[in-house]
Image (cartoon, helix red, strand yellow):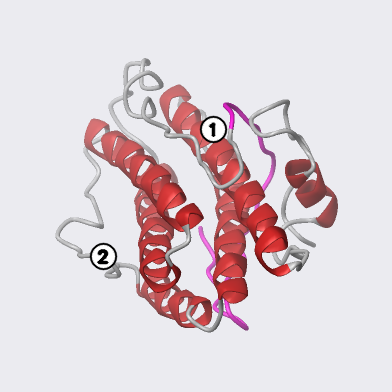
Amino acid sequence: MFHIKLAAGALALFTLFSTTVPALAVDQTPTAGNLASSTLVVAAPATLSTEEADALQFMREEEKLAHDVYMTLYAEWGLRVFNNIAASEQKHTDAVATLLSRYNVSDPTAGNALGTFTDPALQALYDQLVAQGSLSLADALKVGAAIEEIDIVDLEERMAATDKTDILAVYGNLLAGSENHLRAFTSTLERQTGETYVPQYMDPAAYDAVVGSAANGGQTYLPSVKR
């Protein structure tokens, strides 16, 4: 099951392994335009386990949370990195929606406007992160980096809990996007404010492996959860 803890400005989740793909320039994100099409090539089994179905529903809302926070912070600060990454997150949540439809799992975001969530913990987290990101531009960029850290460790946990090839393909693409987004937010923070981001949720060695690697290059094999 999934454990969400709203503590001192965010939540912590758990993980196992990670991977990467395509390229990202500073302040840009992978479009992920092929997530829902080219990766879903394996015929879907008839059913998912409860854990797999719950994971898809959670990831649908978590990717929406990232999109909605970034759109809100873009409106607040007008910094292009938020708009670029929000567009990528929309493709991510759409890719998960394709899997929900494919496996006949209900969509928890149906009918929900920007900033509205079915999961009360995610709703509280959204409100908290938006409030934190509204304090200053530096805080906004740190919120973006924290969200991407959380996405990385969360996706790794879900990947470890399924053997469905199509689900793993989508999760793997989302994971690669989150790694690219983390690099974009941390590098923008340093350029804009001179601050160096300190990881809050990932193991420091795993964080360094992601942030220190070339965008979309190589593989990251270190566990990302911060012990």
Q: Earlier in the sequence, mark 1 or mark 2?
A: 2
| 135 lies left or right of 215 | left
Give how far apart the Cα atoms at labels 1 and 2 are. 25 Å
Task: Kindly identify the residue that appears in the image at 55 percent across and 53 percent down.
Answer: 151
Determine whether label 1 and label 2 are within 8 Å by CB. Answer: no
Quick check: can you spot residue 160?
yes
In the image, farthest residue toward the right? 205
Q: Residues within 10 Å of mark 1 (few under 14, many from 20)?
A: many
Check residue 11 for magenta coloring.
Answer: yes
Question: Nearer the viewer's eye, disc 1 or disc 2?
Answer: 2
Residue 15 screen position, x and y as percent: 66, 50
| 226 lies left or right of 188 | right
Query: Which numbered disc covers residue 60?
Result: none
| Residue that mark 1 sits on | 172
Q: Secondary structure at mark 1?
A: helix
Q: Which amino acid type is shown beneath numbered disc 2?
A: Leu
Residue 61 screen position, x and y as percent: 36, 57
Q: Is residue 164 above or below residue 67?
A: above
Q: Which amino acid type is shown beneath numbered disc 1?
A: Gly
The tally of labels here is: 2
Query: Which numbered disc covers residue 114?
Result: 2
Identify which residue, 225 or 21, lies in the foreground.
21
Task: Kindly identify the residue that appears in the image at 54 percent across and 66 percent down.
Answer: 3
Q: Residues within 10 Å of mark 2 (few under 14, many from 20)?
A: some
Q: Which residues are magenta?
A: 1-23
The answer to which quarter of the image holds residue 147 is: bottom right
Task: Kindly identify the residue that appears in the image at 76 percent across and 67 percent down.
Answer: 194
